[in-house]
Image (spheres, rainbow, N blue to C red):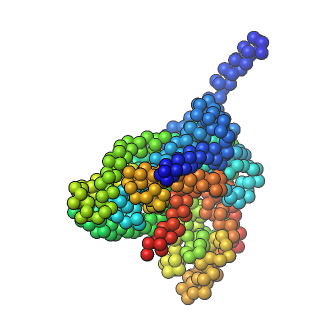
Amino acid sequence: MRTLFVSFSLFSLLAFLVVLSLSFGAVSLSISEILSGFTPDSEFYFTIHEYRFPRAVLAVLVGAMMALSGALVQGVIRNPLASPDVLGVSQGAGLAAVVLMTLFPSVSIFWLPWAALAGGISAALLLWALCGAHSSAIKLAITGVAMAALYSSAVDFLMLTRPLEINNALLWLTGSLWGRGWDQVFMILPWLVLLPLAFWLAKRMNLISLGDEVATSLGVSIPVTRLSALAIAVGLTASCVAICGPIGFLGLIAPHLARRLVGGRHQILLPCSMVVGMVILLLADLLARTINPPIELPAGIMTAIIGAPYFLWLLLKTR
Amino acid sequence: MNLFSKILFTALCFLFSIMSKAVTVQDSQGTFTLDYVPKRIVVLEFSFVDALASINARPIGIADDKDKTRIIKQIKDIIGDWQSVGTRSQPSLEVIASLNPDLIIADFDRHAVIYEDLNKIAPTLILPSRRVVYEKNIEAATVIGKVLGKDKEMQARLAQHKDIMAGFAKQLPQNIEVQFGVAQENYISMHPGKSYVGSVIQSLGIATPAFIKDQKASVHTGLEQLLAINPQYLIIGHYSNKDIVNIWENEYLWGLLRAVQNKQVYHTNDPNVWSRARGTMAAEVIAQELVRILGKEG
């Protein structure tokens, strides 16, 4: 019953935010103007069909994928403070992007998502090579955090020694939906095949939360499940970061909020996290666009403003 | 409309289409063609505003970081009011679209990412502005003059600009070395030899310190690095009254700078025109201020 109520409220909130995203921005539009914006000869065609709508779609997709990725990582690492960031994927992607921007400034900007994607996946592979398939969750997390710190310091080093590209790189590293449109939506769509795979793992992840021994005695192969869950999380995070830059805290707080709302059963937790992620990113981007128009803040700043205090509160509470 | 006026109208349209031939120029993305004279122009960097103002063209929208004081007064007097379209780094595409522009002028460094989106709104001319030296900036202005159908005016204005700059150069001492930097909270951001202001200073026959001569981006300088650069003349721009220079002035190393020892440190309260504006009119303002500061020295 509670689940039904929560999902109903979340979906209403989501629908409401989508309408708000379409109607508000630097120029406010009425519902009829929004609807007319979907026909090519309307004067709002660019604003709605080419700008706000693809951006809202992208926010929904990226929010859902980052949140799902976070829920998977928290599930297998068995720590609510874990997030895709502990795997060093976002930082690896960030490093690859900054390397491309600073060391190869003549390379076309259109390679940026591919470089970031490759960076994120290589970071995950490197982590796997360092830890091996049978390592404990905690070893994985600590090694991941250490690698993430290494990538971040490499990024800082590059930006300090090559100040020429610093502004573009900084902008990218905050994570933003600005300037993203249908092209980016189509780039991210293929990654949605990972979603059913994640749901398929849900039951096993419930057992993992009982502890490695119990899960094993109930017939779950810990290494296989952990590896598949992390691989899916890496794919989801790397593709999102490649498109929007590393949008901070999303993968951490969305699953955590969802767990408070619907509890820890992964069959419900995973989809609920996704919807919470959609809501957070849509809200963050809406605020970023409308707080002081026509200035557009990066959505990553908004998620950090919401996320950092929440994270602190979480830390204090778990102590 | 009766038949006669229809025929007349068609004939006139035909005549005009022959007379007004399309303009084709090279921009940073390749060939750019426009077959009309743009009236509603949106510009996304300050140097383009400068170029427009120098031929009496008025942009309807400017990416001015939502701060109208960033457009220098000399330009404001010509272009009148405009609508802000957001920051230069992330201009708001929906505001640009809402202005119904018929030409957008974008910066290659900042806006290559959104070039295709901009083109969906209006034909987009993409030219270098950020991190570009004086000469390249004049080339960009020339291209803008052609696209606006004001090639002659632009050529005349650039010739006049050359004369003005030559006039200022005569009033300035030669064989000196000048360094410009903007004071921040904990460092001075030095504009080196290959920056816009560095190249303007060089075009006036004044040297810039060899230590950072070949750098393009501004160099964040501490006091020790400043001593290593050790410029003959130092011009510091201040955005506020509280910056690092207040602290450095009390330090021993500051007194070792030859600019300090020879009393050749100057301050300007309008670093905006030196560091952000980047255009021919801005260059004239910079040259004028250099003459005011250094002119009597010669």
Residue furthest out toward the bottom: B252
Q: Quadrant of residue A95?
A: bottom left
Residue furthest out toward the top: B3
Q: Quadrant of residue B190?
A: bottom right
Count of numbered labels shown in the rendering: 0
Residue A202: percent from the left, percent from the top? 34, 52
Q: Nearer the viewer, residue B178 or B268?
A: B268
Residue A285: percent from the left, percent from the top? 56, 53
Describe residue B65's horizontal placement relative to residue A252 as left or right: right
* Residue for point 69% across, 70% down: B269
Q: Nearer the viewer, residue A186 or B149?
A: A186
**Is residue B125 visible in this depiction of the protein?**
no
Residue A184: percent from the left, percent from the top? 46, 44
Residue A271: percent from the left, percent from the top? 43, 50
Describe residue A47's horizontal placement relative to residue A253 as left or right: right
Q: Nearer the viewer, residue A258 or B137?
A: A258
* Residue for point 47% across, 69% down: A314
* Residue for point 65% across, 39% down: A31
* Residue for point 35% across, 48% down: A199
Residue furthest out toward the front: A1
Quadrant containing the N terminus of chain B in the rendered view: top right
**Is residue B293 visible in this depiction of the protein?**
yes
